[in-house]
Image: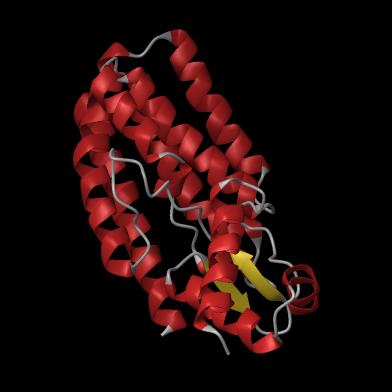
Amino acid sequence: MSPHLTSDLAGALRADIVDGRIAPGDRLPSESTLIARHGVSRTVVREAVARLQAEGLIHTRRGSGSFVLVPPPPESSGAHRPARTLKQRLELLEFRTAIESEAAALAAVRRTPAQLAALEAALGNFDAAGGNPAATLGFDYAFHHAVAEASGNAYLADALQNLGPAMIAMPRQRLEAGTSPETDIGPVSVEHRAVLDAVSAGDALAAAAAMRIHLAGSRRRLEASAGERD
């Protein structure tokens, strides 16, 4: 087996994820399709998929295939570094907690009616898309970005814009067979609602606390997901 073939295939699949041709929650093409499309052996396909799995980009479910978890940011971006390993994702959550708690506090005292409406819309869309992993990831990010926009601080808004949807780590439970969408995203929705209610009430301290609680919950879910994989 040529290591170059494995690297080339892994790079091609990674590019498909980065460019959005394979969205978070989508299934990768089957082994047979990849073999025919790229002219490689089954061993090369499996090694390439294993590389992407080790990077935290995909999750393989026995009998169902491999699914994209989260798109990485461009390697050339100087705004932030990719968060692919568990350690990197936990560090990203620490960074997000620092900036998003302040963003929520500022949003509570600066938000406009239009910005409150945008937050309500993002949360409503998130709840409605519970059965679609790719859609829930997008609306999850949209909610957090809307909070940053409502802060009235361009640097905070830019920080979330630069991170992009890749800042949302897709819990593997969203891809498991038999998982109830309501059970899976329910805690996240409740936590988002607490942030929105505090922002709507103009309570800066409560808004910051609600965001910290939410991101602490994200940390617990991420660690639990990694523990189940291990």
**Up-down relation of residue 69 to residue 111 (above or below):** below
Please tell me which residue is depicted at 30% across the width and 32% down the height of the picture: 159
Q: Nearer the viewer, residue 200 or 138?
A: 138
Q: Nearer the viewer, residue 49 or 108?
A: 49
Please tell me which residue is depicted at 49% across the width and 33% down the height of the picture: 142
Q: Position of residue 129 (x, y in %)?
A: 67, 45
Q: Position of residue 140 (x, y in %)?
A: 50, 42
Q: Nearer the viewer, residue 45 or 206?
A: 45
Please tell me which residue is depicted at 37% across the width and 27% down the height of the picture: 147
**Up-down relation of residue 74 to residue 62 (above or below):** above
Q: How many marks?
A: 0
Q: Position of residue 58 (x, y in %)?
A: 54, 68
Q: Position of residue 29 (x, y in %)?
A: 74, 67
Please identify the quadrant where the C terminus is shown. bottom left
Instruction: Answer with left or right where residue 217 lies relative to residue 166.
Output: left
Picture colour scheme:
secondary structure
Q: Nearer the viewer, residue 155 or 173?
A: 155
Please identify the quadrant where the N terminus is shown. bottom right
Please tell me which residue is depicted at 64% across the width and 79% down the height of the picture: 45
**Up-down relation of residue 179 to residue 159 (above or below):** below
Is residue 12 among what the camera can see? yes
Residue 195 sits in which quadrant?
A: top left
Is residue 203 among what the camera can see? no
